[in-house]
Image: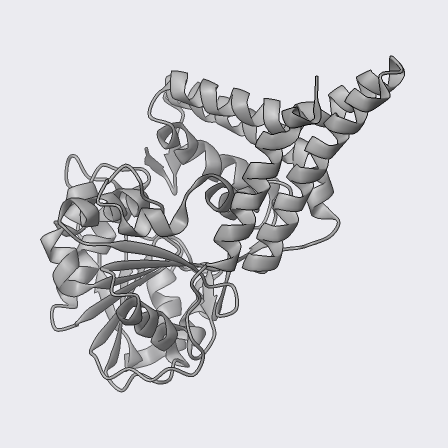
Amino acid sequence: MTWLAVLPWVALTGHTLVNAARLRRPVRGANVTERVAVLLPLRDEAERVTPCLESLLGQRGIPELHIFVLDDGSTDGTAEVVRAVAGDKVHVLTGEPLPPGWLGKPHACAQLAAAASGADVLVFVDADVVLEPDAIAGGVALLRSAQVTLLSPYPKILGAGRLVQPLLQWSWLTFLPVRAMERSPRPSLAAAGGQWLVVDRAGYEQAGGHASVRADVLEDIGLARSVKRGGGQIAIADGSRLAGCLMYSSWRELADGYSKSLWASFGSPAGATAVVAMLLLLYAAPPVAAAGFAIAGRWEQAAMALCAYGMGVAGRMITAAATGGRIWPDPLAQPISIVLFAGLVMRSFRRRRRGQLTWRGRTV
């Protein structure tokens, strides 16, 4: 074994660094003259919708900004909270019954897009996102300057899951050629986060809108692929300076949320097995190997394994610095993060096989 064995880890961390250096970011203090519609789908969000709504009402830099809220069959008084907070400053819609073949969020988003028929740009926001006052204008300005159809600015992830949540941004910064993805017409080469999406209206319709992803658990990535199929382009950006997202407040919520959709992320159980095995080999095995080599007195091999572990930690630190995460000490636990992620993948497939996947009271 020679030091050339460490090259894969060095290459991956180098790729993370290049992606982080070239990552797009919405500009601050932008002004936009287009007609913009913010679309907020809600289902049983009474307890946490208020900060999101208040941040939307405080947006500036867009003279023609309209906010549409859809109450998708809530049973906790979500619509009443919206009206109490926003009054007549937002358009409150009552969701229609879920048709056969549709999942809840794509159906809610499709209704919102139809209601905002006069907008040039559609901005989809989840209820757990809180935006800075110039966030929407900055996102629209970047959509236009990047000359893309769909822009996905990833917000800063808050709340539970410090060991798992950062893997989201880390994964595409490490393994996805971000700028090549933007240029490529291949639908399979796509990434997006549904917490905050900025979409050109004409391109959205050309792609078939959310009707094209009506049964997709990962409707955000599905929509990005539909945009590419329709001849449009997509881009991802770091939105952590303009938006925060409190996705989950407990480990139980996180496990249920990840279980709902992880099974759909890999194409098949075989694909999931291959990806998880690769991640475990690359990022969980090195510290174990380093300890084993050290016990056996094989010091050079132990040093190489320790270097591989260090490259994994460095990649997480680069990602955290680029996306508003915790630079220290969380990256030191990268092997534990990968093991936990592997467990969540197994849980997702197991629950799907047993027909136990639900979300907000609906079967997935």
The N terminus lies in quadrant: top right
Query: Relative to 118, is 175 on the left or the right?
Result: right
In this rendering, does residue 126 appear at all?
no
Q: What is the x, y in percent for residue 219?
A: 29, 44
| Front one among 222 and 100 | 222
Q: What is the x, y in percent for residue 146?
A: 30, 66
| Front one among 277 and 95 | 277
Measuring 53% from the left and 29% from the top, which residue is drawn there? 344
Query: Relative to 199, is 311 on the left or the right?
Result: right
In the rendered view, would you say 37 is above or below 330? Answer: below
In the rendered view, would you say 194 is above or below 113? Answer: above
| Front one among 161 and 309 | 309
Quadrant position of residue 262: top left
Quadrant position of residue 144: bottom left
Measuring 65% from the left and 38% from the top, which residue is drawn there? 312
In the rendered view, would you say 2 is above or below 329? Answer: above
Query: Relative to 207, is 302 on the left or the right?
Result: right
Q: What is the x, y in percent for residue 177?
A: 41, 44
In this rendering, does residue 66 appear at all?
yes
Quadrant position of residue 126: bottom left
